[in-house]
Image: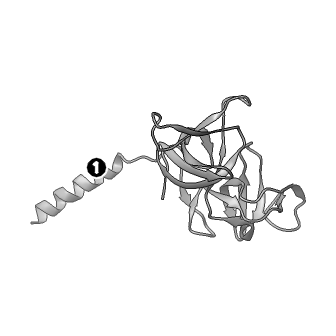
């Protein structure tokens, strides 16, 4: 029995030793949630500061509720965020929502991204979205994401969205 348990332990260790993730992920010191992670802006006015407290200058003001941002660090009640342009700054945690949203990312400004009826490239196209169009991420299966927004509801290739990680599953 003891040899069976030891053998099973070795199999488990070898199995998990080969497991890798697509991104470096740690748990945040303040929230205990994964960092980095995607969230969205909770309000239509979010001040982004140079550092993690109110004494730091405001670098800019976001005015787009629901905009997806990536939390890249935590310090007490402050979160360092990055937007789709790569701009970073600090915001107070209560200005962020766990609601998942995505922004259409296209190869060029003229490129339209197809929204399919199902998560299959052969399914009918129900809409064509311009870069920068935002929607709610309802589900992702690691290849396709169901994106819902004003005037559209369908499936977009996951690689065409900013606000979800490659191969990420969202339920």
Q: Is residue 16 left or right of residue 146?
A: left
Q: Is residue 116 left or right of residue 127?
A: left
Q: How is the image coloured?
A: one colour
For the point 72% across and 58% down, the residue is: 80
Q: Along the horizontal axis of the image, is 71 left or right of 9?
A: right
Quadrant in which the N terminus appears: bottom left
In the displayed structure, 26 sits above or below 127; it is below
Determine the residue positioned at 63% across, 70% down: 30
**Residue 16 or residue 42, whichever sits in front:** 42
Q: Position of residue 145 (x, y in %)?
A: 53, 47
Residue at x 29%, y 54% (from the top left corner): 13
The correct choice, above or below, for 68 with respect to 125 in the image is below
Q: Quadrant of residue 72?
A: bottom right
Residue 78 percent coordinates (x, y): 73, 66
Q: Nearer the viewer, residue 143 or 128?
A: 128
Between residues 146 and 165, which one lies in front from this camera angle?
Answer: 146
Furthest-left residue in this view: 1
For the point 66% across and 33% down, the residue is: 112
Quadrant of the rendered image containing residue 129: top right
Decide if residue 101 is on the left or right side of residue 67.
left
**Image label count:** 1
Residue named by callout 1: 14
């Amino acid at each position: 029995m003891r040899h069976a348990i030891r053998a099973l332990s070795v199999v488990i260790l070898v199995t998990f030793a080969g497991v890798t993730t697509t991104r470096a992920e740690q748990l945040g010191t303040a929230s205990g949630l994964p960092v980095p992670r995607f969230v969205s802006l909770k309000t239509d006015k979010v001040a982004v500061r140079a550092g993690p407290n109110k004494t730091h200058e405001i670098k800019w003001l976001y005015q787009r509720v629901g905009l997806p941002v990536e939390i890249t660090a935590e310090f007490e009640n402050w979160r360092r965020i990055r937007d789709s342009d790569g701009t970073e700054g600090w915001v107070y945690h209560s200005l962020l929502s766990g609601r998942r949203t995505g922004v259409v990312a296209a190869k060029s400004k003229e490129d339209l991204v197809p929204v399919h009826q199902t998560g299959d490239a052969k399914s009918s196209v129900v809409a064509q979205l311009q870069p920068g169009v935002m929607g709610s991420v309802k589900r992702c299966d690691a290849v396709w994401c169901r994106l819902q927004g004003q005037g559209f509801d369908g499936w977009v290739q996951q690689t065409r969205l900013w606000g979800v990680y490659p191969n990420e599953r969202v339920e």
